[in-house]
Image: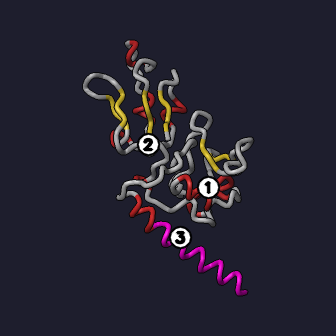
Amino acid sequence: MGNSRRDFFRQFVDKTLGQAADALGDRLPSTSPERPRTRLRPPGAIAEAQFLDTCYRCGNCVDACPARAIQHLKGESEELNGTPFIDARQQPCLVCDGLECMHVCPSGALQLVAREQIRMGLAVVDDKACLRSHGEDCRICVELCPYDEAAMRIDESGTVQVLGGCVGCGICEWKCPCDAVVVGV
């Protein structure tokens, strides 16, 4: 009984203070470099170093994902093995209405955030590889983007422009016929 109560309070303090520290940390210059994210994490993922320490690797988010976009990382380092990630080229995150992955995370590694505040990554378009630069009127990435012109549009010069509303879901990368779009982290 004592351990479960102690664990409850430890998790509460970690979660509460961790969120406050993250908010403050975003405003302060970093004294130590943050471990860069190397993979797309599910929606609502906290900062990578904290994510790796917090994630239970339980698979709840993998099981709850209606698009089957979230997978377990395998064959990597011990630190990364079992953590959830999304390979947008194989199956993008559809940013489902229920945001199920966030709701089933018991550790707090995935925080519940509004759909428009999700930031998994950012689409990057290789203009030289894009069909539009070769005379084609391809609009697939723009037309399939679930965030419409808040995230992606064709600018006055006819090139695809990625905007601040991009959440990094990867639908554009998944559907691009010439692999000109990659979601970076």
Q: 5 or 78, which is in the foreground?
A: 78
Which of disc 2 and disc 3 is earlier in sequence? 3
Q: Position of residue 113 (x, y in %)?
A: 46, 60
Residue 44 seen from this side: no
Spot occupied by residue 80 in the image (x, y as percentages of width and height):
67, 48
> Residue 156 in magenta?
no
Q: Considering only vertical position in the picture, is 107 above or below 78?
A: below
The image's mark for residue 146 is: 2
SS at badge 2: loop
Q: Earlier in the sequence, mark 1 or mark 2?
A: 1
The amino acid pointed to by label 1 is Leu
What residue is shown with label 3?
15
Of the 4 image quadrants, the one containing the N terminus is bottom right
Q: Which residues are magenta?
A: 1-19
Observer-nearest of 96 and 86: 86
Task: Give the colouring mode of the picture.
Answer: secondary structure
Along the viewing direction, whichever of 162 and 22 lies nearer the viewer: 22
Find the distance from the CA under tag 1 to the CA under tag 3: 14 Å
User: What label does residue 52 carry, if any?
Assistant: 1
Q: Residues within 10 Å of mark 1 (few under 14, many from 20)?
A: some
Find numbered disc 1 in the image and state the secondary structure of the residue it sits on.
helix
